[in-house]
Amino acid sequence: MSASLESLHYHVADDPVTGPDVSARSRESFPAGAAPPEFDAPAVPFTSNEAAARFYLDQILRRDNRPALESLVEPQRAERVPSLILESEQDLRRLGTRQVRFAQTARSIPVFGAGAVVELTESRELVSVNARLDEVSGVDPVESLSRSEALERVARYTGVDIYPEAGVGGRLNFYKDEDTGSWHLAWFLPEIPAEPPRPAADVDTDIEATEGHGLGRRPIPPSFHYLVDAHDGEILYYYSAVPTALPRPTRCKGTDENGVEQTFLGKLASPAGTTCQLDDPLRAVRTYDLEFADLDSGPPVPNLPVQADSSDFGTANRAAVSAHLNASRVQDFYKAVLQRDGIDDQGMDLVSLVNATASSMERPPGLLNAFWWKRKMWYGQIQRNGRLVSLSRYLDIIGHELTHGVIESTSKLVYATQSGALNESFADIAGIIINNWYNAPDSEDVGTWNWELGAGLRNDGRPLRDFADPARTGHPGHMDQFRALSPGERPGPGNDQGWVHRNSNIHNKAVHNLLTMSKNGERVFRVQDVAVLTYLAMARLTPRATFAEALQSIVDVARTYFGGDPDRKDKIDAIREAYRLVGISSP
């Protein structure tokens, strides 16, 4: 992708002025384990994290010899880096640092997929910069087509009658075509309810291309993001939009879908009553029963969570008990291990809905799917041993789907080609780790782990994915098997958004290598270490990240995370080796 946005990476440990110096400072004084970089001193002390991040970005851009990056600074007001707009700030609690995320604009118009992530210490010293930026050139910034005309072009392209209000969220973007390197002014039309056409000759048999996540087509309306040239109306790019004072809790029990009696938290429907609801006020987890309502008809969320006459939910609510318990486990893992406050890191309620159907996809009451949609978890069910069994029994699938929600509120990885494969892979990684964290015979001994994701969910009894042996499910485990789009081919339903589920297994295998690597008879990384590294690496990527940039991001996180570790260099070398074994190297 020689014509892609310019990639910019900086880490203090690589600084040619200071160089890495592990012994110079403690992790407490500088988490990266290296001397702070020598930059021009700011005129006044930083008044905010944003000001510090902008100052360091300006300094880094000035040191880069690429004209496209040097052009982004403002000589008279270097502290501003005017083309970058603050998106968010996030505490990286496991690292003791803070991440400041910017989006790039040009002439106040967003640049699609471009942005910068700056990591700072608590004292606002620079740790790292990860960015994909570029100079917009050769394009008229004034549109010739209106937003409504762009929507009409999408309707004509897809053959779908799209209601005018669907384009109300449309906004202008600058878009760089990665095939040609040409810039376009484009209307970005989000969440349009129209699926792009499939090529007539497309008969590919990959399960992901024909069956979504391998669980069957999702019973939800089509939703795609489109980029339409604002001058000539060409459909430039598209990708899927679907990959989100407390009451006193009550201890409850009930039998889950595996026939095991579990204990969990709910709450009393009224202070003086005995009726209990699947509403955990400590974790903000609530579980509802759709009672086999058809999603095609747009059923509302029920008024009340699932409830029982007492604190014992018995065997009559297996699907709901499993959904409630497993959602709570995912919340706990993100909170305790990754120190994230819920799916959006803002303490959002985690709502689960069991017993969903969709007659347009499958004859009720069956629905072979579980998915994250509209910031909620939805569960179908399958026939097993003469009864309906909810997909809520699969903790790995739930961890996977909820992590799509985490990605939505962090890196926003574009769901197409390599960034889409990373979107899927980081969700897979979370699903595998969370499932074994709770269910493996020894969660710290990966030799006891189950490496299957969605065990037994294919028609032939195989899992959806196998981290230990991707070839077992017909997937690649090395970049020499990477499947790329043909020249001029766009990501879409017919090629699984650029083979995101197929190619994701290459990155999955790299992380399997991380988890299983040994030296002198001992594992190089603890499970918790890999969970933290992969989560924080994902969270600091830019939306159109590549596999190589994911590796660099993990290395950058490791430099800080292992800052005071005397084996830091060996561990970073091990990370690079884990990725080298699958053909991925740093950019």
Image (cartoon, rainbow, N blue to C red):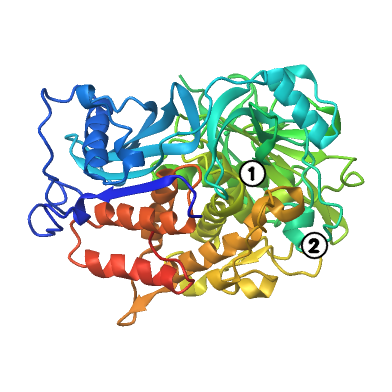
The picture quadrant where one finds residue 168 is top right
Kindly tell me whether residue 384 is visible in this rendering.
Answer: yes
Please name the residue that numbered disc 1 is placed on: 243
Q: Is residue 159 left or right of residue 147?
A: right
10 Å crowding of disc 1: few (<14), some (14-19), many (20+) = many
The x and y percentages for residue 508 are: 53, 63
Q: Amino acid at mark 1?
A: Pro
The x and y percentages for residue 312 are: 67, 40
Residue at image point 33% right, 24% down: 82
Q: Is residue 561 left or right of residue 318?
A: left
The residue mark sitting in front, 2 or 1, is 2
Please name the residue that numbered disc 2 is placed on: 204
Which residue is situated farthest in the front direction here?
138
Residue at image point 70% right, 36% down: 235
Query: Which labelled disc corresponds to residue 525?
Result: none
Residue at image point 15% right, 46% down: 30
| Nearest to the observer: residue 175 or residue 468 | 175
| Nearest to the observer: residue 77 or residue 445 | 77
The x and y percentages for residue 435 are: 55, 57
